[in-house]
Image (cartoon, coloured by chain):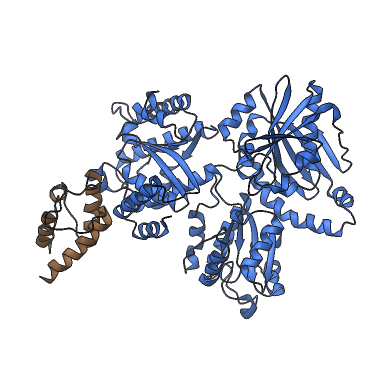
């Protein structure tokens, strides 16, 4: 096997197109000759109004650095209309999973006679909306729709100013129309170019020589952004961020300098850490689970969280706190066990190169972030990493991190309870089971992407597949939500059942592992079996497909009275006769059926 | 002549990086390097600009289609 890490790093540190071009060639050859293995292969199409090749070179390399091979289809130069409008085009024959459509304003504002204004905005957005609609009719894939770059240019130049406002208006319209569309994701090129700085993002030289508007520096950022979008779309982002303390969350060493001397507060130095903590709180609000992994005196360090006047992060934000003198990889394993997530869901943030190196070698599954030596830039590095990227925020995202942090209180309750029954009664749980509605699509897709341990068949359905199934008569999708006295966990379980006259078949059954062991999983099975019986169905089929991660669910069907019924490929088949089912009582749960 | 020596080494490195060409000589040109296509040419011009700290005008850029031409162009620029 060929190691491409060196090639990728060389290209990244050079940043030049020529280096990316060469690296991309090695990656393509290595993949085609089966000398490089990738964790993921994505069929991705690229349509643009300009020469797209340079961007692909950058994207192939940045993808490879995330262990993804981008199997790219390139639309011809400025052929995006033909590619989309012709149902027989190369684009549709390629059947891409993701198609990036990136068009310059010049290409869509073709009619120079129309004066800038609402009419022109209407016309231009109409053109792009029709294209996307046509694409959706002909492809099952998802479209990444780029916003138009609203190049601001020099002030005191009124014509450009009008044009910029018009382009921005089109962007707003297009974004509004597609923001809730399950087949479309907005790729906000305008925002990204503004973030990078338009004057540096666009290169007149490149435009003239290669008919491609972007500078080499911006191409690199653009490719990284594309990879981040891809990761967010494929659910390849991470769940948990684990933090060091000294010189990461504050300046200085609390055990030596003391709580009054550490750098944290409105003055410099100290503001840079406030900045980072704000960014971490934002991540917490977006559903990222936070934990602490620090080699320190427990009492000294906890005192900072409790008593320091400028500390924004508090104990209540953390799902696990490991502060001791053990090595950090051991602490990391403890954190993973306590939160009950995989190491491959975790990111580690530590200012010390030595600790980072140790973590990388001991636990390569954990992403240990490379940080600049200057803490002023920690926040930016964290944001641009793309490990926690999201297209939109769901209610469950806001609840999740809170819920994981409450989990520590549940663990306390469990320890202080004299029996399991006592614990369950103490939780005061309410469980709601109801059929999926269209508004649930995002959350259901997220559960399908993220759930590994208590997932009976680990089928990874996309949003459009789920949407089709909700609308289909042949499927029932059940969802389960739970809350207890410590908080609302939101939707944590889902099951897809194929219904027919003879028998029902449980195609998928999965539940967030943070609620497993509280009898909730049985509520959902009971409901399905009861509904089957009510509908005069005699038999319900189910399956279990073993993966590296779902041993937890191996005996689940058996424990619900199903009997083994042979196998079908990878799948162990189970079935139960509805007449023989003994329904359970759930004395500790309040069950709401909708 | 020290400069010429230096040019050759840097050009050698550039061509290796750009097109995976192990040895360049006087005959190396657009006609005999596989990856030296129109896109490769743009990437090469950008790389030459950076490597030698120069700015290449569009008219010169289209003409730099062989090692000989590049070498004599760089010689004139020095």
Residue A303 place in picture, x, y as percent? 70, 71
Residue A536 place in picture, x, y as percent? 80, 20
Q: Which corner quadrant of the image does residue A506 belong to?
A: top right
Q: Which chain is brown?
A: B
For residue B61, side relative to residue A3 (left or right): left
Q: Which corner quadrant of the image does residue A79 belong to?
A: top left
Depth check: give the residue in front, A298 or A193.
A298
Residue A134 place in picture, x, y as percent? 44, 24
Depth check: give the residue in front, A128 or A410.
A410
Depth check: give the residue in front, B22 or A327.
B22
At a point 61% along the width and 49% down the height, the residue shown is A286
Depth check: give the residue in front, A399 or B75.
B75
Q: Which chain is blue?
A: A
> Does residue A151 show up?
yes
Q: Is residue A496 above or below residue A160?
A: above
> Does residue A102 show up?
no
At a point 39% along the width and 56% down the height, the residue shown is A8
Residue A72 place in picture, x, y as percent? 39, 40
């Amino acid at each position: 096997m060929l190691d491409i890490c060196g090639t990728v790093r060389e290209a990244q540190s050079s940043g030049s197109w020529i280096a990316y071009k060469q690296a991309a060639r090695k990656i393509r050859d290595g993949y085609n000759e089966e000398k490089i293995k990738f964790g993921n292969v994505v069929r991705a199409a690229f349509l643009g109004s300009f020469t797209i090749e340079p961007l692909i070179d950058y994207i192939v390399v940045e993808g490879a650095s995330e262990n993804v091979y981008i199997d790219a289809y390139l639309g011809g130069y400025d052929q995006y209309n033909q590619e989309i409008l012709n149902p027989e085009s190369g684009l549709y024959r390629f059947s891409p999973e993701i198609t990036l459509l990136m068009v310059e304003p010049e290409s869509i504002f073709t009619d120079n006679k129309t004066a800038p204004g609402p009419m022109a905005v209407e016309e231009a957005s109409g053109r792009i909306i029709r294209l996307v609609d046509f694409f959706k009719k002909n492809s099952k894939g998802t479209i990444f729709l780029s916003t138009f770059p609203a190049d601001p240019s020099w002030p005191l130049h009124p014509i450009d100013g009008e044009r910029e406002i018009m382009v921005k208006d089109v962007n707003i319209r297009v974004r509004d129309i597609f923001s809730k569309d399950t087949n479309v994701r907005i790729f906000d090129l305008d925002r990204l170019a503004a973030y990078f700085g338009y004057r540096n993002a666009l290169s007149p030289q490149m435009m003239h020589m290669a008919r491609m508007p972007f500078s080499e520096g911006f191409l690199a950022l653009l490719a990284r952004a594309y990879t981040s979008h891809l990761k967010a779309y494929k659910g390849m982002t991470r769940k948990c961020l684990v933090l060091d303390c000294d010189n990461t969350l504050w300046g200085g060493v609390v055990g030596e300098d003391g709580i009054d001397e550490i750098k944290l507060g409105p003055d410099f130095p100290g503001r840079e850490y406030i900045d980072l903590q704000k960014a971490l709180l934002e991540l917490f609000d977006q559903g990222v689970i936070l934990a602490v992994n620090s080699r320190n005196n427990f009492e000294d360090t906890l005192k900072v969280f409790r008593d320091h006047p400028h500390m924004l992060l508090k104990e209540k934000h953390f799902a696990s706190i490991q502060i001791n003198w053990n090595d950090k990889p051991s602490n990391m394993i403890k954190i993973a066990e306590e939160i009950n997530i995989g190491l491959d869901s975790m990111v580690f943030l530590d200012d010390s190169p030595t600790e980072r190196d140790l973590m990388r070698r001991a636990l390569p599954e954990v992403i240990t972030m490379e940080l600049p030596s200057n803490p002023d830039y920690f926040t930016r590095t964290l944001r641009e990493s793309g490990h926690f990227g999201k297209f939109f925020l769901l209610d469950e995202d806001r609840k999740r991190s809170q819920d994981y942090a409450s989990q520590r209180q549940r663990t306390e309750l469990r320890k202080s309870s004299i029996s399991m029954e006592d614990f369950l009664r103490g939780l005061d749980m309410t469980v709601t089971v109801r059929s999926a509605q269209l508004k649930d699509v995002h959350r259901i897709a997220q559960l399908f992407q993220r759930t590994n341990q208590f997932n009976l068949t680990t089928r990874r359905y996309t949003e459009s597949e789920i949407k089709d199934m909700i609308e289909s008569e042949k499927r029932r999708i059940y969802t389960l939500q739970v809350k207890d006295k410590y908080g609302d966990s939101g939707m944590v379980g889902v099951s897809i059942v194929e219904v027919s006259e003879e028998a029902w078949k449980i195609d998928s059954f999965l539940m967030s592992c943070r609620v497993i062991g509280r009898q909730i999983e049985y509520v959902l099975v009971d409901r399905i079996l009861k509904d089957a019986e009510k509908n005069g169905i005699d038999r319900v089929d189910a399956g279990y497909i073993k993966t590296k991660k779902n041993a937890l669910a191996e005996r689940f069907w058996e424990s619900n009275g199903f009997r083994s019924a042979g196998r079908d490929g990878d799948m162990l088949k189970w079935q139960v006769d509805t007449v023989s089912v003994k329904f359970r009582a759930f004395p500790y749960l309040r069950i709401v059926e909708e | 002549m020290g400069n010429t020596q230096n040019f050759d080494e840097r050009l050698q490195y550039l061509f290796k990086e750009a097109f995976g060409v192990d040895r360049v000589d006087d005959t190396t040109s657009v006609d005999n390097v596989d990856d030296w296509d129109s896109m490769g040419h743009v990437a090469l011009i950008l790389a030459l600009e950076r490597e030698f700290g120069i700015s290449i005008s569009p008219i010169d850029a289209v003409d730099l289609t062989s090692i000989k031409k590049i070498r004599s162009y760089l010689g004139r620029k020095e």
